[in-house]
Image (cartoon, rainbow, N blue to C red):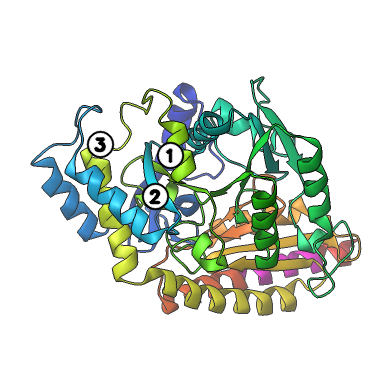
Amino acid sequence: MSANRKLIKRYKEVNLGEVSLPASFHHAEGAYLIDHDGNKFLDFTSGYGVTGSGWLRKEITDAISDQLTRSAYAPPWLSTQEAVELSELLLSITPTNLVKCARAIGGADANEIIFKAVHGYNGKKGIISFNRSYHGGTHFALNISDAETFHLPQLPGGAEFHFVNPPYCYRCEFRKSPDSCNLECTRVIERLLEAEKEIGSFYLEPVIGSGGIIDLPEKYLKHIRSLCDRYEIFLVFDEVLTGFGRIGAITAAEHYGVNPDAISFAKGMSGGYAAIGAAVVNEKLAEGIKKFEDVSATFAWTPLSCTIAYANIELIINERLYENSLLQGNYLKENLQKLFSKYLPDQTGDIRGQGLFIGIELVKDKQTKEPDKRLMQQVLIAAFRKGLMICTSWDFQVLVLMPPLNITRSEVDEGLIKMKEVLQQITRTMEANTIQN
């Protein structure tokens, strides 16, 4: 039995964590993941959007070593220089209307902190969020995520949850194109806001990640901002995936030119070296959260995790990795469009995304747009066997590519060569099956 299989067997015997690919992570080298059998995989996942600045950056490991000579942890009731410096950095890269940071251990925690702030400010418990959205795995975050689509537990709670369809342009329910769109999909939101007076916040991912890389049009986001202003609703950007350069700017708020009332951060915030998240909020929400005792997690924003996050964000800013994300992302998406149009012309429905956050939607029929989840899984496994690590949306409807933000042009080209080999192999299999039938 291989080392991979042995470890996976042991893992399943004692752990409830999911194992979706027949490999067990051992270590990383540059842009590669290496398993326990020594197999190398070119990483086009960033650990699902976490390792934005790249794997094993010396600048971060040096910062960790230096911090450990002082302290990894501090009592949560004491201020630390590391927390002050991280807060100042976060406020410097977010819209100027956001004035305070709240410490969190991850994205779900950050989203729940924002809800506490909303409730503290106006007492309202109603929340709008999108179908196909995912905001985290805690009790609260699951309730504002699409539990039905992704087979998540639906939990009772004291808040009122309202779901609306996102502007899924490829599958527009109003049969509009971006050129003919008059934001018809926002009318149901406006009617909801008129009818439900207890709605206090609207949570959205500026680019829906686990739901299939659905990038919200700029004019849509600006209209939602205006609706939230009109009905005095707090607009919350969940930037757990889009934050820190993933879509070609430090934040989606900057990219789209829309100022939310709060932003939740996690994943790419620390580059995977520590668990950390943050809620960055405006003055009203800051006043709302002050009405409660501080109930932040004991391990939120330790000196070590703050040092790591600061060093990671500095790397992204100083190396302008958000610009590399836009440059390499545009190149990658353009060449993926060429490859899929050549080898799977009848099955390629849509290729979309911003920066290094790309989705490829495959279908059985381009007219009906019926998803081809089986083909999706074939591409995923074939890529894995070729040494290319990619992801899919939670429901296997969209292939997801999220390379580290420091990926080079030669590494992108290597990934494209591997993808070409995958598509050639699948095409040959499809042709052989057609002949046999």
Q: Which mark is residue 286?
A: 1
Secondary element under disc 2, as helix, strand or loop, is strand
Of 207 and 193, the residue lying toward us: 193
Q: Are marks 3 and 1 in contact (CB under 8 Å)?
A: no
Q: Nearer the viewer, mark 3 or mark 1?
A: 1
Of 89 and 421, the residue lying toward us: 89
Q: Residues within 10 Å of mark 3 (few under 14, many from 20)?
A: many
Q: Amino acid at mark 1?
A: Ala
Residue at coordinates 16% horizontally, 54% vertically from top-left?
Answer: 62
Mark earlier in primary sequence (2, 3): 2
Report if residue 149 is visible in the image.
Answer: yes
Residue 138, image x and y in percent?
53, 29
Give the CA distance from mark 3 to mark 1: 21 Å
Q: Range of the magenta residues?
A: 421-431
Q: Which mark is residue 302?
A: 3
Q: Quadrant of residue 427?
A: bottom right
Q: Are marks 2 and 1 in contact (CB under 8 Å)?
A: yes
User: Eyeballing the image, is 381 above or below 411?
Assistant: above
Magenta span contains residue 422: yes
According to the picture, the residue beneath numbered tag 2 turns out to be 99
Instruction: State how many labels appear.
Output: 3
**In what quadrant of the picture does the N terminus appear?**
top left
Q: Which mark is residue 341?
A: none
Residue at coordinates 40% horizontally, 42% vertically from top-left?
Answer: 277
